[in-house]
Image (cartoon, grey):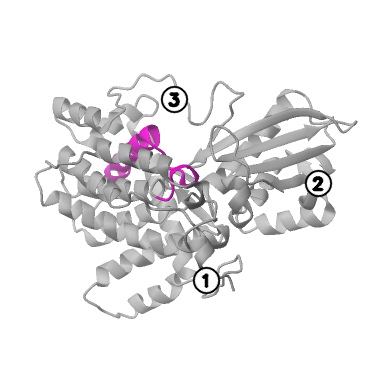
Amino acid sequence: MFSIGIGPSSSHTVGPMRAAARFVDVLQANSLLDAITRIKLDLFGSLGATGRGHGTDRAVIMGLLGADPETVDPDRVQEIVGDISSSRLIRIGGYVDIPFHLETDVEFHLRRLQGHPNALTLTAFGQDGTPMIERTYLSIGGGFIVDPDETLNDATQRNVSVAHPFATAGELLEHCRVEGVGISDVVRRNEMAALTSDELDARLLQIWEAMQECIARGINRPNGELPGGLRVPRRAPALYQALQNGEKSDLSTLEWVNLYALAVNEENAAGGRVVTAPTNGAAGIIPAVLSYYVNFVPQADADGVVKFLLTASAVGILIKTNASISGADVGCQGEVGSACAMAAAGLAEVLGGTPMQVENAAEIALEHNLGLTCDPVAGLVQIPCIERNAIAAAKAINAARLALHGDGRHRVSLDQAIGTLRSTGADMNSKYKETSRGGLAVNVVEC
C-alpha cells in the first residue's frame, strides 16, 4: 500500500508513467524498437478530463524515456519535457529517437473505456504509418496498473501462501482472536512469506524516512505559489516559522498536524517526491498522523512506526480489495477516506488498542468520509485536496481516540462501512469522480 513516487497523482501520474515504461518493455520484447516511427497516446475518462492538470502527458513521456517514479528526479521533469516539446524528438527507452509532437501525439478524451475510468492507450506505428502494436492500460489507483492483455498485473494477487489470509475485517479479527495477537502481528506474519523480518522493517522504515524527507522539503521551500495557474500559495513554510517562533494556541498540537499534512500535499501538488499512501491525493494524512505519534506520544519508537504502517496497510488492503482507493472510481471517499481509516487504525494500534478497537477506529474514520466527492478545481490536486488532507489527519486522530475510549464493540463494522463506500461510489454521478465537471470544480471561478 506504500510506494515512493512523484506528484501530483498516483493514478494520473505514477500509474501512467509505469504504463508507458511497460509499453517500452513490450516493444523491446517484440524487437520493435528499431522499427517504430511514431507513438500515439490516448487518454480516456478521468485521465482525459483532468490529465492536463495532473501532468499525465508529462508522466507518460518520462515513462517512454525509461524513467521510474521512485527514482526519477522530479525537479528535472519539466525541463526534459520542454526539451522534447522544442526538439519534437523523443528517445524511446533511452535507445531510439523518433518524432514526437505533443500537440498531435497526445489526445485527451472524455469518453470512458470499459474496465475503469482511468484508461490510456499507447500505439506504436511502423514505417508505412500503420499500427504495429497497441496496448491499453487501466490505472486503478495507488499507482497500480492493469493490462487486460497480460495475465500478471500490479494488482494481481501473487501465488504466495501466507500464514493468515484474510479478505474481510471479520476474518482479520478472527485471526487476531485465535492467535492472541494484534493486527500488526498478523500482517507481519503474512509479509514474511516474501520477506525476512529485518527486510520488512528496513523497507517500512525507508518508507517512513521518505515521508519525513517530504515533510522537510515542504516546510523548507521558499514562500510562493504552486504551479498550475490557480495562484494557490504555499502555506507550510510560513506556518512552520510561526510554530518555530513559539506561537502558542490551545490547539498547538493540531497546528503541527496541519503543518505536516500541508507540507506533504504542497510538495505533491508541485510534482515533488512523495510516498503514495495509499494514493498521492491523500498522501499527507498518514505522514501527518505518524508524525503526531512520533513527536507527541511519549512512548513512540521505531517499532511503533513499523506497527503503525503494518496495521494501516491491512486496512488499505481491505478497502482496495472490497471497494476502491481510486477517486476516479468512487470519489474522494476512496482516497482521503481510505487514508484516514488507515491512519486511524495505525494510531489506535500503537496507542495500545485491542484489535477490535483498532477496527473500530478505522470504521469511524471511514464512516465519516462516506460520500466525499472528488472535484478538483482546474483538474489540479490543490483545491480542495491540500486542506482536505489536513482535515482528515485530525479526523483520524480523533477517530482513534474515540475508539480507545470504548471497548471495541460497535454497531457498524468496518466491513459494512467498506461495502457502503463501494455502493455509494457506484451510485455517485461521474461528474463528482475526478473529472472536474461538478462540485467545486465548476462553482469556483478560475482567475
Residue 71 visible in the shown view: no
Amino acid, disc 2: Phe
Residue at mark 1 = 232
Residue 282 visible in the shown view: yes
Q: Mark 2 Cα within 10 Å, few/some/many (few <14, many 20+)?
A: many
The answer to whether 402 is drawn above or below residue 315 in the figure is below
The answer to whether 414 is drawn above or below residue 235 in the figure is above
The region drawn magenta spans 303-332
Query: Quarter-wise, where is residue 285 in the image?
Result: bottom left
Query: Quarter-wise, where is residue 355 in the image?
Result: top left
In the rendered structure, the answer to whether residue 32 lies left or right of residue 319 reads right
The answer to whether 233 is drawn above or below residue 93 in the figure is below
Main SS, magenta residues: helix
Question: Extreme left residue here?
Answer: 407
Give the percent coordinates (x, y) of residue 4.
49, 46
Amino acid, disc 3: Gln
Residue at mark 2 = 100
Residue at mark 3 = 157
Q: Nearer the viewer, residue 287 or 246?
A: 287
In the rendered structure, the answer to whether residue 355 lies left or right of residue 226 reads left
Q: How many callouts does the rendering have? A: 3
In the rendered structure, the answer to whether residue 108 lies left or right of residue 156 reads right
The circle on residue 79 is none
Which quadrant: the C terminus? bottom right
Q: Mark 3 Cα within 10 Å, few/some/many (few <14, many 20+)?
A: few
Badge 1 or badge 3: first in the primary sequence: 3
